[in-house]
Amino acid sequence: MKTAIYPGSFDPVHNGHIDVIERAAKLCDRIIVAVAENHAKTELFSMEERVDLIRQAGSHIPGLEVRSFEGLLVNFVREEGAQAVIRGLRAVSDFEYEFQMALMNRSLDENLETIFLVPSQENIYLSSRIVKEVARLGGNIERFVPPVVAAALVGKMQ
């Protein structure tokens, strides 16, 4: 069984994330979305809320598991018996950062592979930050996030 980890803060999960998870599910038997605390950011949704939103939004994806984690990604990957880390790329700027992270992870565990996936064209520009900003300003976010996330965002913004 091939297992891959898709780490991120997912605050909130958007259609670009779901697209990457669906693509990864075609490559692996088991996809673990690893929701991380990002101490550099102030998060809108709690860890539990983010895990729950991803579970609901991804309920149609076979082999999907969602859990939170803290600490080094390579340790989480080892604990889960995963063979790869999935990372989504939107732009060249993403690649520079993700390439550095992939090399660091490989230096910590030489057996760890990183698979870069590009979301579909209609989702490539999405980021959680942009979605939250549109929601804060009262814009319609329904085409950017799964329905469960749209409802949760509207609830947070009231």
Image (cartoon, rainbow, N blue to C red):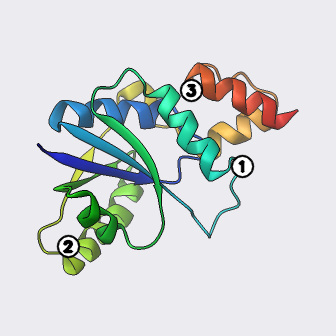
What type is the residue that disc 3 sits on? Phe
From the viewer's side, name the closer residue of 81 and 93: 81
Q: Residue 44 carries which label?
A: 1
Residue where numbered disc 3 is placed: 144
Whether residue 139 is situated above or below residue 42 in the rendered picture? above
Residue sitting at x 81%, y 28%? 138
Residue 103, horizontal then vertical, whole percent: 24, 73
Question: Can I make out residue 81 in this image?
Answer: yes
Q: Which residue corresponds to the image point at 16% horizontal and 56% vertical from the top-left? A: 83
Work out how far the residue at label 1 is from the one at label 3, CA to CA, in angstroms: 17 Å
Mark number displayed over residue 106: 2
Q: What is the three-letter code of the residue carrying label 1?
A: Leu
Image quarter of residue 150: top right
Mark 1 or 3: the one toward you: 1
Q: Please identify, in this view, whether the residue under mark 2 or under mark 3 is nearer the observer.
A: 2
Residue at the spot x=17%, y=38% of the render? 28
| Residue 119 seen in the figure | no
Could you tell me the amino acid type at mark 2? Answer: Arg
